[in-house]
Image (cartoon, rainbow, N blue to C red):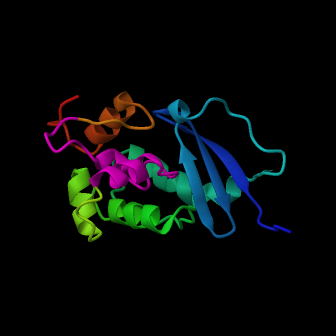
Amino acid sequence: MNNTRTYFHFYDSPLGKIRLLATDEGLISLTIPSQRIDDLVDSSWIDDAGVFLTCCQQLDAYFSGDLTEFTVRLAATGTIFQKQVWDALCRVPYGETCSYKSIADSIGNSKAVRAVGAANGKNPIAIIVPCHRVIGANGKLTGYAGGVEHKAFLLKLEGIINCEE
């Protein structure tokens, strides 16, 4: 029997209403509106804004330009490889970009560029695990689960305005 409690909260952001999900271990999901088909919640989830107080404060500070590194406790589930990629994404500094190849190199698997792209696309914690900082090797914006327009917004927020759409 699974006794894990899942909490949810909706956070109003410049991108629209963000859905946050967490367990007692930490944040498991941050999805922006364009990533969701609807705002349905599972009947077993607990609506508790208090669980997300620190996360929402950090998001407020990020969107106002006052926070460059999140310290929210994360508990995303994925494969070992996906978690390696997501950890590498968290090491890409605010205001900088990288390529799929540089992420593959950083995890010691230089031939896994396509797999890195797939893992990047499966990132369940957008913004905080900054998959938006990955751009094409040619400097152009590449796909983003939340939509290229939201990726461009986040990169401009971080002062990266020289990447091409």
Q: Quadrant of residue 23?
A: bottom right
Q: Is residue 120 magenta?
A: yes
Please, which residue is most extreme toward the front here? 111
Closest to the observer, 74 or 60: 74
Visible residue check, residue 119: yes
Figure check: 14 above or below 9: above
Q: Which residues are magenta?
A: 113-140
Residue 34 placement (x, y as % from top left): 51, 30
Q: Left or right: where does residue 131 sit relative to residue 51?
A: left
Q: Is residue 88 magenta?
A: no
Closest to the observer, 32 or 110: 110
Q: Left or right: where does residue 114 sit relative to residue 127?
A: left
Residue 45 placement (x, y as % from top left): 78, 51
Closest to the observer, 43 or 160: 43
Q: Assign the N terminus to one quadrant of the image.
A: bottom right
| Residue occupying image coordinates x 22% and y 43% | 159
Residue 14 placement (x, y as % from top left): 46, 33
| Residue occupying image coordinates x 84% and y 45% | 43
| Residue occupying image coordinates x 22% and y 65% | 105
Residue 111 placement (x, y as % from top left): 24, 60
Q: Quadrant of residue 110?
A: bottom left
Q: Assign the C terminus to one quadrant of the image.
A: top left
Q: Left or right: where does residue 98 sit relative to residue 65?
A: left
The number of numbered discs placed on residues in the rendered structure image is: 0
| Residue occupying image coordinates x 77% and y 62% | 5
Q: Left or right: where does residue 55 sit relative to residue 142?
A: right
Visible residue check, residue 66: no
Q: Quadrant of residue 101?
A: bottom left
